[in-house]
Image (cartoon, rainbow, N blue to C red):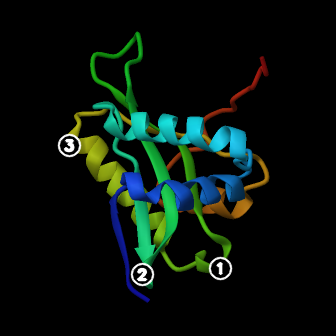
Amino acid sequence: MEHRVRRAAAQDFGVVAALLAELGRPQLTAETEGPARDVYLRHLSRKDTASLVADCEGRVVGFMSLEFRDRLNRVRPQAWIPDLIVTAQYRGRGIARALLEAGFAIAREQGCWGVTLESGYHRQAAHRLYLRVAMADAGKYFDYPL
């Protein structure tokens, strides 16, 4: 089954929001949809992002947010992947790997020194993929809700 990775676009908002909910992010409501769309559009317009979607069979089935951030001890940016999701029925077809590889290529083009990715403990299958693409299990992250 063919799939294609491309830059996320404004018209992808609805499906990206649904994919993020599948990842465990909050479901949008009538009150949050407009502000969330504004955040998404702002994200796409920033020069320090290059988020991607994967199309398969004529529909978006995967999303990866990609940002470039400065680290105080580095002179080149770091690529950061806070979100990576492929909808359940399309997993195991190489789509997440294609998103990652496209992101790695963009990070190289941006002159990044490395890529880091955040992933919840429950995403064990995804963690196996990250190890297969030569990423290292290098730490933990902690949340403090405000």
Residue at screen point 65% across, 45% down? 119
Q: Position of residue 67 (x, y in %)?
A: 41, 35
Disc ID at residue 89: 1
Q: Nearer the viewer, residue 2 or 73?
A: 2
Between disc 3 and disc 2, the foreground one is 2
The residue singled out by tag 3 in the image is: 109
Q: Position of residue 137 (x, y in %)?
A: 61, 43
Q: Position of residue 95 (x, y in %)?
A: 47, 71
Residue at screen point 34% across, 16% down? 74
Point out the residue furthest to the bottom here. Answer: 1
Q: Earlier in the sequence, mark 3 or mark 2?
A: 2
Check disc 2 and give the amino acid type. Gly
Point out the residue furthest to the top here. Answer: 72
Q: Residues within 10 Å of mark 3 (few under 14, many from 20)?
A: few
Q: Position of residue 46 (x, y in %)?
A: 33, 32
The quadrant of the picture occupied by the C terminus is top right
CB-based contact (under 8 Å), mark 3 and mark 2: no
Q: Residues within 10 Å of mark 1 (few under 14, many from 20)?
A: few
Residue at screen point 23% across, 37% down? 110
Q: Quadrant of residue 139?
A: top right
Q: Nearer the viewer, residue 97 or 29?
A: 29
Q: Is residue 84 above or below residue 108?
A: below
Q: Earlier in the sequence, mark 3 or mark 1?
A: 1
Q: Nearer the viewer, residue 67 or 41?
A: 41
Q: Residues within 10 Å of mark 2 (few under 14, many from 20)?
A: few
CB-based contact (under 8 Å), mark 2 and mark 1: no
For mark 2, give the secondary structure. Answer: loop
Check disc 1 and give the amino acid type. Gln
The residue singled out by tag 2 in the image is: 58
